[in-house]
Amino acid sequence: MKTPIRLTPAQRLDWLRLIRSENVGPRTFRALITHCGSAGAALKALPDLARRGGAGRPARICPREDAERELAAAARMGVAFLALGEDEYPAQLATIDDAPPLLAVRGQAAALKEPMIAMVGSRNASAAGIKLAEQLARDLGAAGLVVVSGLARGIDAAAHRASVATGTVAVLAGGHDSIYPPEHAPLVEALIANGAAVSEMALDYGPRGRDFPRRNRLISGLALGVIVVEAAQKSGSLITGRMALEQNREVFAVPGSPLDPRAAGTNALLKQGAVMVTEAEDVLAALRPIIGRRVEPPRPERRIEDGAPLPDPPADARARIVALLGPTPVSADDLIRLSGAPTTMVQATLLELELAGRLKRQQGGRVALI
Amino acid sequence: MKTPIRLTPAQRLDWLRLIRSENVGPRTFRALITHCGSAGAALKALPDLARRGGAGRPARICPREDAERELAAAARMGVAFLALGEDEYPAQLATIDDAPPLLAVRGQAAALKEPMIAMVGSRNASAAGIKLAEQLARDLGAAGLVVVSGLARGIDAAAHRASVATGTVAVLAGGHDSIYPPEHAPLVEALIANGAAVSEMALDYGPRGRDFPRRNRLISGLALGVIVVEAAQKSGSLITGRMALEQNREVFAVPGSPLDPRAAGTNALLKQGAVMVTEAEDVLAALRPIIGRRVEPPRPERRIEDGAPLPDPPADARARIVALLGPTPVSADDLIRLSGAPTTMVQATLLELELAGRLKRQQGGRVALI
């Protein structure tokens, strides 16, 4: 088992600045640490890398003062930043390839060390759906699982409410200082007594529609499995279910009548092989063998001691790699094979393009030009 | 492929007398044909066999006049007797090990040659269940399947009604002259135009509670698969589902809310691996590979040409075999192994016990003393 890292205050500030900089997402963050050796070195290298990637204007780097201000405001709110690789960081979440480098946590960080089960479902849930969500959350909580959900109206809120006493984690789509929907602010205050609210966004960030799928990966990422209680076809809850599959999480679904449109999504998941849930025991039976298993999270900051940073790619190799890219996602492996360039060079080029805002990374390591 | 048999009128009368005789069920009938060579020979051997099996009084043999009267009444009602092994006998049904030797058919015997799907469910069905049964029956009928069900109130009747135009088969628990429930007599008159009503019981036999499970094996036996639309826990529809599994039929189930007791049985079947059905295509997709497959029914009457009848077991071997039997079902294979007696001798002894009303045969060839 790897030794956990522990960031110094200066390193934590560098990490926060880096993840809050333009075009730096969790995957780019990880690639930058690998490429440059540390967040501090990455901040210095950022302008040059983005320029080489073809950025029209210099990418915006988060100013030191902004990051200091966020850290101070977080401290006042009782929000702690857990860094990926630190002991307190949730072990399951650390296993996904776009785990947030810093997770802002309010409440009991210890709750994040417990085995978790996610519950998601329709916002306009039926009375039966609400009742089932409550029953399941209560029974799973009593069995020792922490219930994770997204603080939305409907199923999410029902799941949180029924597990406030046993421990529940709300994953916010926005920042801690911008709870959505606003009427659930009291629910957050209640649940942090035994659980936690977590976010990867800046404290005052107000969530927009496109932020919810991004948030959903954290709901499934934190948990051993995801229960979809009610979901129409093409709903956000189904996206969470698919995300969970990609993250190798167990997917559970509650069945419903074929005549009920709010069961169309869950029935579809069941046809695709999700585990049917009519009572908590169905979930517990599937999770028991998993809960004992040891989880080995990756530790990106350890790259500091791992040797020299990656070489800068020569211009012709970079051009060859860029020429192979297009709007259709391709795997990095294919790029390496087709370009004939060394792996490190392909990775460095992709990083530059990403920082220049020209590249999008997708689940499974595939990349496409924007 | 085996050549179909064709009974002479005299043979058909012998078959009817034999199956209507005391202690002779479909499995015993088959064993008697094997043992004695023909139904006529079996009728002669019956008193002696039953006496050797330890019957306290002579087993009642169906008098020739009774069988003649039944055949005449059947002819007046337009009921034909199809014999197991004849070309008109439904091919799927012929594959089960307790297929009725004679199937009394009213309506279009040709419908029994089409691929069939069974639909069963609660008698006190919900409106949603009725609607789903109708939708499925209509769509499956339109796709070329004949819908089989049990003429009961609720789901059964809905399935028949929605497939009257495309062809539906009602399997009666009683005889053709004793329709149950009586208010469905007009439904029978309607469905025989394009489909059929079938029964293994004497024409005027009024069904009792214990006859329904026996009838259910014919519903699943006729079909390629069974759809359970709505079923409470421990319901008759669940028994049909289990029967279908034992007969190697596909089992389909319609999901429902865990809060709906009429979905408890179908959800349980789905957890056990039944195929989930929310629309007809789910059934068609599973059956398409099966419909093309050739079915090879067994032909018991062919034993006539197969050589000498089985030997009569000596008294000591018989005693050894009987001593091994008890109320706990054992396999015939175990009896052969443990008794050290030849297979034919064990089979003959079991037959005698059965005719004496002292033995019960179960699914999978296991036997127990009554």
Image (cartoon, coloured by chain):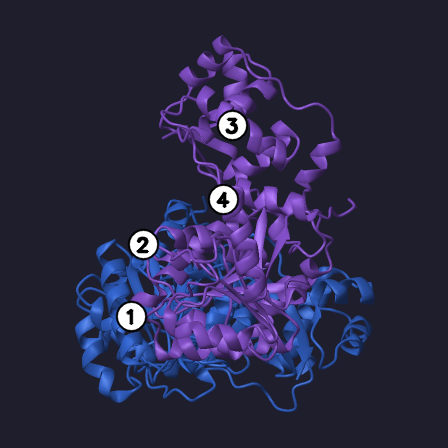
Chain colours: A purple, B blue
SS for tag 4?
loop
| Res A20 label | 4
User: How many residues crowd around disc 1 within 10 Å: few (fewer than 14), some, or many (20 or more)?
Assistant: many
Q: Name the residue under label 1.
A: B133
- Disc number for residue B108: none
Viewer-nearest of labels 1 and 3? 3
- Which residue of the protein is positioned furthest toward the front in this rendering? A65
Badge 4 sits on which subunit? A
Residue at which label 3 appears: A351
- Image point (36%, 79%), residue name: A127
Do marks 1 and 4 share a subunit? no
State yes or no: discs 4 and 3 in contact (Cβ < 8 Å): no
Gap between marks 4 and 3, in whole Å?
Answer: 16 Å
Residue at which label 2 appears:
B281
Q: Residue B309's x, y, as percent? A: 62, 61
Q: Position of residue A37 (x, y in %)?
A: 66, 31
**Badge 1 or badge 2: first in the primary sequence:** 1
Q: Which of marks 4 and 3 is in front?
A: 4
Q: Which chain carries label 1?
A: B
